[in-house]
Image: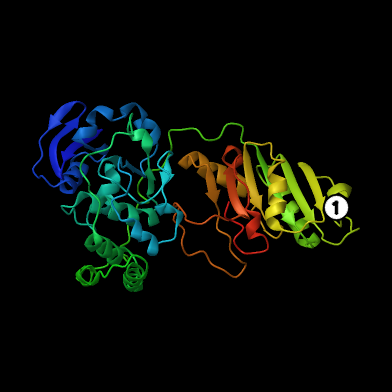
């Protein structure tokens, strides 16, 4: 592990295994890039000199448990990129919960780290500019799409309440530049209009300034050569329950159950919530009892329609280590559950979302990455993650029940 200590965007010292290394440039990003070339198998860590005493090295093996992880933490109340980025991006990545490990491309120069192999894969396409915070945010923003796992990680510091005196927040010039380089062009105008209407600002000069910078949106990185094998354990019992809400799809549900029965890794229990709003109606799913199934079937019948309510009823019945949030019209490969558990072990993931294609669709984007979406009918979730959440009934009968 190599640690670069800095202050006010200048390097003060570089340490490797408690020995000081020489460096040829004061530019932090350039030094990191050079170190990555010299030590391609090392983790590269950056830390403000004021936080040296709080660097929580004991947690680093837990934080960086595979080579495609980039993590940082800011001690400030605000991120480097201004909150106005919310006018441009509506993903969950920009509303960071600083109390927990949180997926985000919003990086900080306060403290952080990544593996040298990631920088070596990206260095030829991103210049190591003098503004280190901007460099880190750009690397993370572009890297996430290529399969880099980026986090705000409070465990990097043993005392994460310690706040730096120096304020390194970007201004409107850097905000507009960032939008120009990482989003479609139309977002520049939309950002300008939003700041004008809602913030009573007139950032014409920042808008013009940003036009001189070349977009990085089309830059593509190939991180496939970087080995991913987590050193941490996510799966213990490998048990899984499946929940399926259904209404009026007897034939389709039968096919789903047949696919589940053919799995190379069988579920423990399949929880089916059948809905029929007609008073006095009874279940039409006779095959649940007149056929033998290689798993327990928990059948709940209700006159109250709605996928949110149905899924919440099913979640209350989950007993296994994992949950497969399924739909009543999915068709499944026989080794789907087995393949998902293999990826969970490889990445130490606690939530896995699969591609959800129609029969005539072809999967174009195949890179495993952190997604800003959640599928209520094609997701595998560790059960403990669902103990304090539920589907919002305010979204019932809409197309947004995936929000939890």
Up-down relation of residue 310 to residue 182 (above or below): above
Q: Position of residue 146 (x, y in %)?
A: 37, 55
Q: Residue at x 25, y 69 (%)?
A: 203
Which residue appears at 57% of the width and 55% of the height? 403
Q: Percent position (x, y) of residue 105?
A: 36, 51
Residue 153 location in percent, x, y?
37, 39
- The residue lying toward the viewer, choosing from 97 and 329, is 97
Q: Is 92 situated left or right of 299 in this image? A: left
Determine the residue positioned at 31% across, 28% down: 57
Q: Quadrant of the N terminus?
A: top left
- Camera sees residue 64: no
Front-lying residue, 29 or 253: 29
Residue 247 vertical placement versus 160 (above, below) = below
- Is 355 above or below relative to 74? below
Kindly tell me whether residue 188 is visible in this rendering: yes
Label 1, secondary structure: give it: helix
How many marks do you count on the picture? 1
Query: In the image shown, does 8 or 360 lie closer to the viewer?
Result: 8
**Residue 190 in the image, given as x and y percentages of width and height:** 36, 71
Q: Quadrant of residue 357?
A: bottom right
Q: Is residue 355 above or below residue 167?
A: below
In the image as oriented, which residue stretches furthest toward the left? 24
The residue wearing badge 1 is: 287
Res 327 quadrant in image: bottom right
Is residue 12 toward the left or the right of residue 86 in the image? Answer: left
């Amino acid at each position: 592990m190599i640690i670069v200590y800095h202050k006010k965007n200048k390097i003060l010292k570089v340490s490797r295994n408690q020995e000081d290394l020489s460096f040829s440039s004061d530019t932090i990003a350039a030094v990191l890039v050079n170190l990555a070339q010299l030590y391609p198998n090392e983790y590269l860590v950056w830390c403000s000199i004021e936080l040296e005493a709080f660097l929580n090295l004991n947690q680093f093996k837990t934080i960086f448990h595979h080579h495609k992880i980039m993590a940082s933490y800011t001690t400030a109340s605000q991120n480097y990129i201004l909150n106005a980025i919310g006018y441009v991006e509506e993903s969950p990545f920009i509303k960071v919960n600083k109390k927990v490990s949180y997926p985000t491309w919003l990086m900080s120069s306060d403290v952080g780290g990544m593996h040298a192999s990631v920088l070596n894969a990206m260095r030829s396409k991103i210049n190591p500019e003098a503004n280190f915070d901007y460099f880190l945010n750009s690397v993370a923003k572009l890297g996430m799409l290529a399969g880099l796992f980026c986090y705000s990680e409070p465990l990097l510091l043993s005392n994460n309440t310690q706040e730096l005196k120096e304020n390194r927040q970007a201004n409107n010039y850097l905000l507009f530049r960032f939008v120009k380089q990482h989003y479609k062009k139309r977002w520049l105008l939309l950002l300008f209009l939003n700041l004008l209407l809602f913030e009573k600002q007139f950032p014409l000069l920042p808008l013009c300034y940003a036009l001189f910078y070349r977009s990085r949106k089309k830059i593509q990185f190939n991180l496939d050569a970087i080995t991913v094998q987590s050193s941490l354990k996510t799966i213990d019992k490998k048990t899984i329950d499946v929940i399926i809400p259904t209404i009026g799809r007897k034939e389709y549900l039968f096919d789903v159950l047949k696919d589940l029965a053919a799995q190379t890794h069988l579920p423990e229990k399949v929880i089916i919530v059948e809905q029929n709003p007609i008073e006095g109606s009874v279940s039409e799913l006779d095959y649940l009892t007149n056929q033998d199934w290689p798993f327990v079937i928990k059948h709940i019948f209700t006159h109250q329609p709605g996928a949110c309510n149905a899924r919440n009823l099913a979640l209350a019945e989950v007993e296994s280590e994992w949950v497969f949030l399924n739909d009543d019209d999915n068709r499944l490969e026989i080794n789907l559950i087995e393949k998902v558990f293999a990826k969970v072990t490889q990445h130490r993931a606690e939530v896995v979302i699969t591609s959800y294609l129609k029969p005539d669709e072809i999967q174009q984007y195949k890179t495993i990455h952190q997604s800003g979406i959640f599928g209520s009918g094609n997701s595998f979730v560790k059960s403990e993650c669902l103990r304090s959440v539920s589907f919002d009934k305010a979204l019932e009968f809409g197309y947004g029940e995936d929000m939890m």
